[in-house]
């Protein structure tokens, strides 16, 4: 049984994670940390093997650092902050940190396919579309997609286009253009439960990862070396 504390437990993602962890056979929800619930992350770290953080860009780094300093593995889903400081904290700690800008398998597959296309049709644009309460733009997924496409030989035109509207959840399109043709890839998360199998996989695997700091669900799904 893996003991899991959820940081940001009262949020849109946090609530779905709590329900998922509670419902899985091999994970146990031991704490819900969130200022709106009156529970501080620091007060629950002693109970958890793994913390899952879906909070805000301005607090995720400090939360993850607190976990690492306490020797607790941390799975970070929060986007919109610089990962380099987190990498350094993880590498200096005795716990593991796993970060994914997108826990949905479809989004990860889009990134994989985009890297295959990039050497053959390098010119491309990224359009990401999210609900209007999302704090960061462009999305962490779009920035990661751009990085992977560039590393694979593509030319991602700037800026990345960010659409924020009520009714949306999380969506992304990559459009490649070549001589007399275009090729579009699109992924839609129409429900937050799209992220939950990926979050559970990370909770199960984070403690046994070979490196202290790992980014990208693709590393857990197919051991991809990209990026
Ligand atoms: N990686 C992914 O697949 C993925 C998918 C969806 C959303 N996200 C990201 O997850 C984050 C959360 O999104 P959301 O829609 O659930 O946001 P939200 O605003 O609904 O929830 C955030 C929660 O964090 C809480 N919080 C704030 N400060 C805190 C702290 N110091 N400690 C603990 N909790 C704290 C807030 O009270 C709130 O309940 C965002 O950064 C979003 O971009 C990532």
Image (cartoon, helix red, strand yellow):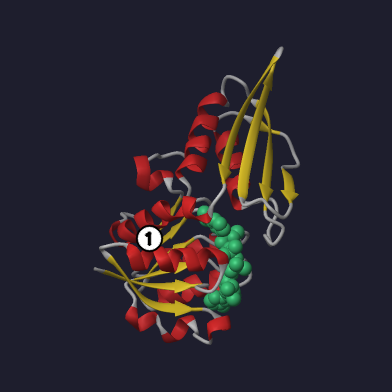
Residue placed most toward the observer, 104 or 202 = 104
Q: Based on the displayed image, in which of its 4 quarters is residue 92 positioned? A: bottom left
Q: Secondary structure at mark 1?
A: loop
Seen from this angle, which residue lies furthest top?
Answer: 180
**Quadrant of picture, ligand 1:** bottom right
Report the label total: 1
Going by the image, does 3 lie left or right of 81?
Answer: left
Picture coordinates of residue 207, whole percent (x, y): 30, 62
In the image, what residue occupies the spot 53% across and 63% down? 13
In the image, what residue occupies the spot 54% across and 52% down? 191
Residue 79 seen in the current view: no
Picture coordinates of residue 132, whole percent (x, y): 72, 58
Q: Which residue is mark 1?
A: 212
Task: Determine crowd level at label 1: few under 14, some 14-19, many 20+ residues with C-alpha closer than 10 A.
Answer: many
Picture coordinates of residue 180, whole percent (x, y): 71, 12
In the image, what residue occupies the spot 49% across and 40% down? 106
Going by the image, does 137 lie left or right of 187?
Answer: right
Picture coordinates of residue 169, whole percent (x, y): 62, 52
Label 1 CB sits under 8 Å from any ligand 1 atom: no
Residue placed most toward the observer, 73 or 88 = 73
Q: Based on the displayed image, in which of its 4 quarters is residue 205 positioned? A: bottom left
In the image, what residue occupies the spot 36% across and 47% down? 220
Rendered view: 175 above or below 187: above
Residue 222 seen in the current view: yes
Seen from this angle, which residue lies furthest left?
Answer: 1
Please state, as top left, top right, bottom left or bottom right, where the N terminus lies in the image. bottom left
Residue placed most toward the observer, 185 or 113 = 185
Rendered view: 170 above or below 11: above
Going by the image, does 52 lie left or right of 56?
Answer: left
Q: Based on the displayed image, in which of its 4 quarters is residue 154 positioned? A: top right
């Amino acid at each position: 049984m893996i003991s899991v504390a959820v940081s940001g437990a009262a949020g849109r993602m946090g609530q779905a994670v709590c329900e998922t962890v509670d419902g899985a056979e091999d994970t146990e929800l031991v704490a819900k940390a969130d200022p709106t619930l009156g529970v501080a992350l620091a007060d629950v770290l002693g109970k958890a093997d793994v913390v899952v953080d879906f909070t805000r860009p301005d607090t995720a780094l400090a939360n993850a650092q607190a976990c690492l300093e306490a020797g607790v593995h941390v799975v970070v889903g929060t986007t919109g902050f610089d990962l380099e400081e987190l990498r350094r904290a993880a590498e200096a700690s005795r716990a593991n940190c796993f970060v994914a800008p997108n826990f949905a398998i479809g989004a990860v597959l889009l990134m994989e396919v985009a890297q295959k296309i990039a050497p053959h049709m390098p010119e491309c644009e990224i359009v990401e579309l999210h609900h209007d309460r999302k704090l960061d733009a462009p999305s962490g997924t779009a920035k990661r997609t751009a990085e992977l496409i560039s590393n694979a030989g593509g030319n991602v035109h700037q800026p990345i286009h960010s659409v924020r509207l009520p009714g949306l959840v999380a969506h992304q399109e990559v459009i490649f253009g070549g001589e007399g043709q275009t090729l579009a890839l699109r992924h839609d998360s129409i429900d937050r439960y799209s992220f939950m199998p990926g979050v559970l996989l990370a909770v199960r695997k984070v403690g046994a990862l070979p490196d202290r700091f790992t980014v990208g669900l693709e590393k857990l799904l197919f051991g991809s070396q990209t990026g």
